Image (tube, rainbow, N blue to C red):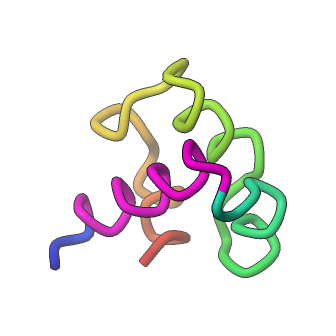
Amino acid sequence: MTSYEKVAAVVGWVREKKITGYRISKETNAREMSVIALAQGRAKIDNISFATALGFD
């Protein structure tokens, strides 16, 4: 599974309300607002910072 696919899977879980953005941010280095923006469609995976992507990996 590529890093892109991992991020997409996590964003999908947040959209489906299986996990919260807060929990993701606490268990990774990703900022909570970045996770929420991705889940709400206000940000695209292609546009996230490298540091945010590493937080999901």
Q: Quadrant of the N terminus?
A: bottom left
Give residue 45's position: percent from left, percent from top.
35, 40
Residue 4 shown left or right of residue 1 in the figure: right
Most foreground residue, 6 or 47? 6
State whether residue 46 is above or below residue 21. Answer: above
- Judged from this view, the residue extending furthest toward the left is 1
Quarter location, residue 50:
bottom left
- Judged from this view, the residue extending furthest toward the top is 42
State whether residue 41 is above or below residue 31. Answer: above
Q: Quadrant of the C terminus?
A: bottom left
Residue 5 falls inside the magenta stretch: yes
Main SS of the magenta part reads helix
Give the residues drawn in magenta, as a range. 4-17
Q: Which residue is painted at 53% across and 36% down in the image?
A: 38
Give residue 27's position: percent from left, percent from top.
73, 81
Give residue 2's position: percent from left, percent from top.
16, 72
Residue 4 shown left or right of residue 28 in the figure: left
Most foreground residue, 44 or 23? 23
Q: Which residue is painted at 56% across and 37% down in the image?
A: 39
